[in-house]
Image: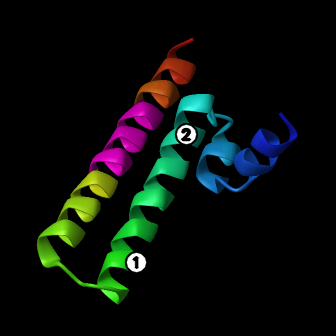
Amino acid sequence: PAQLDRIRKDLPLLLFTGQATIAQTTLACLYVAFRVLHSWEHAGINRVMVRFRWYLMSCAVLLAMWLGFAIDFTRAALF
């Protein structure tokens, strides 16, 4: 729980709006992990198709984060 609170504070937009949920925090961690893997591949062997897959996965996670944020924000505004 203490580590989760620390991670939540590192998400300024979600924290600012009070919408930092467990799902958003998990997605943010996944996004960072995919970006690290993408960078690792780029700096290492540099197989373009593998690197592109890491990039696409990070984009999918980012899209999910924004959709979740929009849904949560709209839900909070309506109720």
Q: Position of residue 59 (x, y in %)?
A: 29, 55
The front one of 21 and 34 is 34
Magenta-highlighted residues: 60-70
**Tag 2: residue type?**
Thr
Residue 33 vertical position relative to residue 65 in the rendered view, above or below: below
**Quadrant, the N terminus:** top right
The residue depicted at 35 percent of the width and 39 percent of the height is 64
Q: Is residue 63 magenta?
A: yes
Label 2: which residue? 26
**Quadrant, the C terminus:** top right
Name the outermost residue toward the left: 49
Name the outermost residue toward the right: 2
Q: Position of residue 2 (x, y in %)?
A: 87, 40
The residue depicted at 40 percent of the width and 77 percent of the height is 40
Name the outermost residue toward the top: 79
| Callout 2: SS | helix
| Callout 1: SS | helix
Q: Position of residue 46 (x, y in %)?
A: 23, 84
Colour scheme of this structure image?
rainbow
Left or right of 25 on screen, residue 66:
left
**Image quarter of residue 24:** top right
Left or right of 67 on screen, residue 13:
right
The residue depicted at 59 percent of the width and 41 percent of the height is 25
* Badge 1 density bin: few <14, some 14–19, many ≥20, Cα 10 Å: few
Label 1: which residue? 40
**Tag 1: residue type?**
Trp
